[in-house]
Image (cartoon, helix red, strand yellow):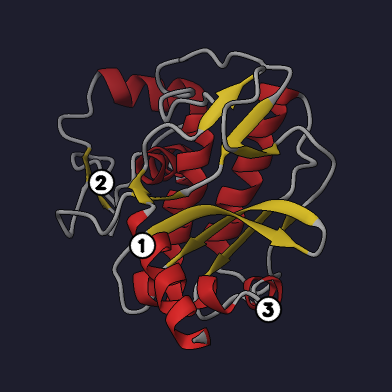
Amino acid sequence: MKKTLTILLLSFLLQNIKAAERFIFFNEKPHEANICLSSEGIIQYDAKEHKGVIIAIDNLKSDLQKVIGHSNVPIIIGTWGESDIVKKCLSKDKATIKLLDKELKGKYEKYIITTIQNGTEDCLLIVGSDKRGTIYGIYELSEQIGVSPWYWWADVPVQTHKNVYAKSAIYTDGEPAGKYRGIFINDEWPAMGAGANSTFGGFNHKMYEKVFELILRLKGNYMWSAMWNSSFY
């Protein structure tokens, strides 16, 4: 009987997985929302996480500060099969463990965003099948709260909100349809070259840091660098 109930629960959860439609709402709590991102809490992740994931987490903190004024939110972030904090939070939730293992194990650049209960607190969970999957999940949340991937390059304004609510469900984009997705910095002079010189002092690591962030926020994974006198090897 217990096994039958577990199978039925997993079947229900699998049917409830959604593409990354809108799951963030502002100011008025939507139906089936069980978490307010402006409530007290912390962003939890392993110190041993991939460096790129930690950079994205730092950007998420900054994004949340822009939108709701602070970053103390109940969010748990980790890469599946590697994150101790995720394992600990799900240690008693066997159904969710089975679900995430089925959906993420061996998958390419896939993320899942959902809500879980950590002790007595409802939390938002962002977990990826690999480091870029985790990064894409982080930036999906950033975009849904209103921070455009183009906030820096195109000066897209960020609107502030008093409250940010997450609707309870399981969200994912699935695996990318194409393996390589990115940007080719072609014919960089004079426009981008002049901008890079005046803003960063050239086509240097500070400029490429902004390019890499843009690509990852757009869920890309490939960059063909500037060529002419700005090439690097």
The amino acid pointed to by label 2 is: Ser
- Tell me where residue 91 sits by quadrant: bottom right
Please say if 90 is above or below 34. Answer: below
Judge whether residue 209 can be spotted in this image. yes
The dot on residue 225 is: 2
Q: Secondary structure at mark 1?
A: helix
Which amino acid, by three-letter code, is at mark 1?
Leu
| Picture quarter with the C terminus | bottom left
Within 10 Å of the Cα at label 3, are there few (<14), some (14-19), or many (20+) other Cα atoms? few
- Find residue 182 and report its horizontal and vertical position in percent: 23, 46
Mark seen at residue 92: 3
Q: Are marks 1 and 3 in contact (CB under 8 Å)?
A: no
Numbered mark located on residue 14 in the image? 1
Report the residue at 60% width, 70% height from top: 49
Mark 2 surroundings within 10 Å by alpha-carbon count, few (fewer than 14), some (14 through 19), many (20 or more): some
Quadrant of the image occupied by residue 196 = top left
Give percent across and percent down for residue 46: 69, 70
Q: Is residue 130 visible?
A: no
Q: CA distance from mark 1 to mark 3?
A: 19 Å
The reply, left or right, for residue 81 in relation to residue 41 is left
Looking at the image, residue 47 sits to the left or right of residue 184; the answer is right
- Above or below for 232 versus 84: above
Q: Residue at x 79, y 31 (%)?
A: 70
Q: Earlier in the sequence, mark 1 or mark 3?
A: 1
Say whether disc 1 or disc 2 marks the residue closer to the N-terminus: 1
Residue pictured at 69% horizontal, 52% vertical: 123
Q: Amino acid at mark 3?
A: Lys
Q: Nearer the viewer, residue 192 or 8?
A: 8
Q: Nearer the viewer, residue 165 or 93?
A: 93
